[in-house]
Image (spheres, rainbow, N blue to C red):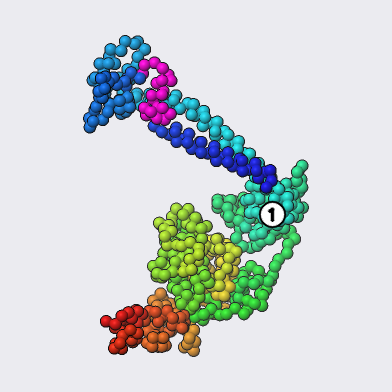
Amino acid sequence: VTDADCRMRSVVAQLHACKEEMTKLLKTLQMPLTWNEPNGGVNELFSTIGGNLHLNFEVRNSDGFVTLAKKNKTVDEEYLFNAWKEGKDCPSWLQDSIFWIDDPDFQNLWVLRHEERLDQLHRWKDFHLETLMATLENVNRRYDELSAEKANISQEIDSLVLSEARIIGATTTGAAKYKELISIKSASVVMCEEAGEVTEQNVISALTERMENSKETKHLILIGDHLQLRPKVESYSLTKVSGNGYDLDVSLFERLIQSGFKSAMLNVQHRMRPCIADLIRRQTYPTLEDDPRVSKYPAVKGVASNMLFLDHSVYEDGAGNYEITTKSNSYEASLCVEIVRYLLLQGYRHSQVTILTPYVGQILTISREMKRRMKDVSAYVSDLDQETLLRQEDVNDPDMSTVVQAGDENSIRCASIDNFQGEESDIVVISLVRSNAQGSIGFLKEEQRVNVLLSRAKHGMYLLGNSKTLRLSQKGKHVWNPLIEIFENTGNIVESFPTVCQLHPNDGITYCTTLQDFRIQRPNGGCCRPCNARLSCGHACPLMCHPTDRSHIVTHKQCTQPCRRIPLKCPHNHPCKRRCNEECGPCL
């Protein structure tokens, strides 16, 4: 234990004592002024200032008698003071005593109006607690001094720790906040990860210059991707896409590369299967190569293709209303939920499937639809997306009861593009939302967002959107036309979702166009053939073809056929009269 540690413990103990004393003083100052409280109350105040003000509330009892009021309440100084404070008149028996007081300096407090009495109370309280206020100011000043001393000792301890460290890790915000402390270490090399998402000023604030107690940064290494999402800037007018020239969302990383600064690029990707990587290879990374392992990914179960653009012409909610800042599309939300349900019935875990969308309003629509259509599955929405939802003024009733926190095994991740960068999922279902006659596509015209959108999936990716709207966009057609051409050339732009039965693949493809098609043609994820497999109880499986629960463990527990078992304790070998999924119990 160092000397700094000992001093820190002492300061923390003193801070705790100061805090307790301030709490006690504040509680006292907030108390109403009564006859005896706080600190002796008005009774003590009258003794301090002297004079004969106490005669206004003096009760003269003689011969051991006690004056009583209504309901047998004892009339004493406190009773009279409370009556005076409430604006009541002076009792007649007290008026006579006050009237005969022969003192020119006597002040009859009972003649004051109620408002004047309250003003007098405030003056008395300020005077009575003046000493306490001075004490509180001294304690508060002492608390500030101790806090400053604690900060200095903490910096001293941190400096000792940093002096022995070879590597210091910090967020860009933390590096700026503790710049003075970190500069003592004089790190000559600064490495910034995800530099494409960090504003230029945040990177510069992490660098040090030559001073008396520090040396300058000699080597800055920036690692990132300037072709994905830029740093977040709260005001749209300050962004590059606004065209106002401020460009505060342009990172130092992007600016250096656009200026021709020498850089190196990693050309091998280890995430996406080749057909998905072809999209961003055509659009953004022409030299991108695939690691051999991504070609060995298994095909998506139950679907005829690993990558699809499901084309439709159903307009978005409130199409043509330009005052709405966040968009939603109820049709796509319902279809997304139905596709996710179908994928879960193929045996995929909830953590393997993600729904992505460019708008947080669509996240809320999807979560509500998921709660309505899948009783046992909820939508998991990250804290960042929830905060964005709560800030949206035009989102109707942002009810967070339809979403769950991370860690729920029966939840499907629903995320916005902005808050899913750097993450991935085996299968991604994408709701593009925008569908209108004007070709208005909002965020989807930005190449960086589309790049992130199309590079999150590993095994399978399914887009839901209106290709006509995307092609009509004046500002976004240069982004989407090449992509839609790839889908067309590979036969992966469809109007119905092509499903196949895992257990009977020779039956061919069944196309599901409507929500009802999924429930009728693929009720349990397989085809419409009866399963007819024998359960452990001997009954035939009552379900249609189902790819999951092939051992029929769950199905057996749900069997409702008449029980064929004979209770062990029945001497007459009577058959059980209960349902198969119920315990036999004693013989009846």
In the image, is residue 579 above or below residue 205?
Answer: below
The answer to which of 434 and 183 lies nearer the viewer is 183
Q: Is residue 419 visible?
A: yes
Stretch of the chain drawn in magenta: 33-53
Let me know if residue 307 is in the magenta part.
Answer: no
Q: Is residue 10 rendered to the left or right of residue 581?
A: right
Residue 49 belongs to the span the image colors magenta: yes
Q: Is residue 146 left or right of residue 186?
A: left
- Left or right relative to 12: residue 192: right
Answer yes or no: is residue 435 visible: no
Residue 468, placed above or below residue 203: below
Image point 58% across, 38% down: which residue?
A: 14
Q: Amino acid at mark 1?
A: Ile
- Picture coordinates of residue 511, whole percent (x, y): 45, 81
- Front-most of residues 392 and 100: 100
Q: Position of residue 522 (x, y in %)?
A: 42, 80
Please give the count of numbered marks on the rendered protein.
1
Read off the residue under disc 1.
Answer: 168
Going 35% across and 85% down the picture, which residue do you hit?
568
Q: Is 136 situated left or right of 398 in this image?
A: right
Picture coordinates of residue 232, whole percent (x, y): 58, 55
* Number of other residues with Cα within 10 Å of mark 1, as a class: few under 14, some 14 to 19, many 20 or more: few
**Image quadrant in which the C terminus is located:** bottom left
